[in-house]
Image (cartoon, grey):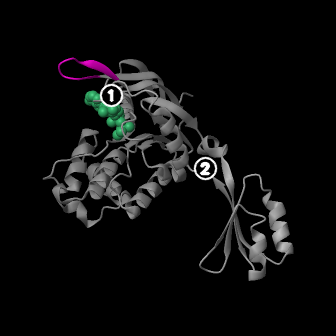
Amino acid sequence: MSAAIETEGLTKDFSVGFWRPRPYRALDHLTLKVEAGEVFGFLGPNGAGKSTTLKLLMQLLYPTSGEARILGRPAGDAAVRQRVGFLAENPYYYDYLTAEELLAYFARLFGFRGADVDTRVARVLDEVGIGKERRLRLRRFSKGMTQRVGLAQALLNDPEVLFLDEPMSGLDPLGRRHVRDLILGLRAKGCTVFFSSHILSDAETLCSRVGVLVQGKLVASGPLSEILAFELKGWEVVVACGPQLHAELATFARTVTPLSDGHVLLHLAPDAEPDRVVGELTRRGAHIVSINPVRETLEDYFVQVVGATAGRDTSGAGA
Ligand SMILES: Nc1ncnc2c1ncn2[C@@H]1O[C@H](COP(=O)(O)OP(=O)(O)O)[C@@H](O)[C@H]1O
Ligand SMILES: [Mg+2]
């Protein structure tokens, strides 16, 4: 079986500059594969080339070179479009239609007719959590509500593969949670989801694998656990103990921080053998409240990779 999404050397040059046009490479030989049923996070800072990639996959843009395939067929193939959903970044819709009217319009574009249109529209509006607002004109919608309409539109045809460009942007924490749960629900149904984000915590809860794009180049890809696994930064141990033990704690830990609830937070070095330390502390009468490994977060990783890549090449970036 072929992958759900596959790109091979996908490259896009834009022509920038009015008087002396010159090519600017927004995407540089992107090769990646997303298997059916995966939730893939396509991560990178602003300007990395994420939206360009999605537009190439949707054939809203044509590549300078390279190929993209969706469900085993060339991207843009009419038969594939029927099986794909797409939410653009910052979607914008006709102000004077209601959410219901807009979605009915899209449903008819997909070829649905009669009662099926109304049933589908009602279902996707429920799915994205738009209630009675569905009868309001879209110009009265906030950014977050518009984003939900966009999501509803992307779900109309029960897509097998869903492409979402920054689906969480503009949403408040509740809206974010809602979108996250929606994606998890889709994953449970076997839908392949490819979403871009510059917000790393979105990926941490959702993705089986991620790709990190920086200045048009894929700098890492794989399961988050593998990308981040190499960095154990230490251990955090919270203990409850009498004041007589406080002075001794410093011999076990790199830092000792009293907490407001009377407990004490210890930071241990990565090689500190937490079992041994916990054993020693318990023997001396301390009570262990919690112990956690401190891992490199995706945020740390991101800052590090972007830092290393920035400054290496900024030519042509003045678009
Ligand atoms: N139509 C265009 N013409 C010229 N440059 C563009 C065009 N679209 C995007 N770019 C440039 O390509 C780079 C990648 O943009 P984009 O794919 O939107 O990044 P992201 O979605 O990761 O923020 C940016 O430097 C952007 O300015
Ligand atoms: Mg973008």
Q: Are marks 1 and 2 in contact (CB under 8 Å)?
A: no
Residue 291, above or below 221: below
Q: Residue at x 78, y 77 (%)?
A: 245
**Within 10 angstroms of label 1, few (less than 14), some, or many (20 or more) residues?**
some
Amino acid type at image mark 1? Gln
The quarter of the image holding the N terminus is top right
Dot 2 beta carbon under 8 Å from ligand 1? no
Question: In this rendering, which labeled residue sits more in front, label 1 or label 2?
Answer: 2
Q: Disc number at residue 296?
A: 2
Q: Disc number at residue 59?
A: 1
- Label 2 element class: loop
Decide which of 135, 91 is in the foreground and name it: 91
Quarter of the rendering containing residue 20: top left
The quarter of the image holding the C terminus is top left
Q: Residue at x 36, y 36 (%)?
A: 47
Q: Mark 1 or mark 2, which has the lower sequence index? A: 1
Q: Which residues are magenta?
A: 15-24
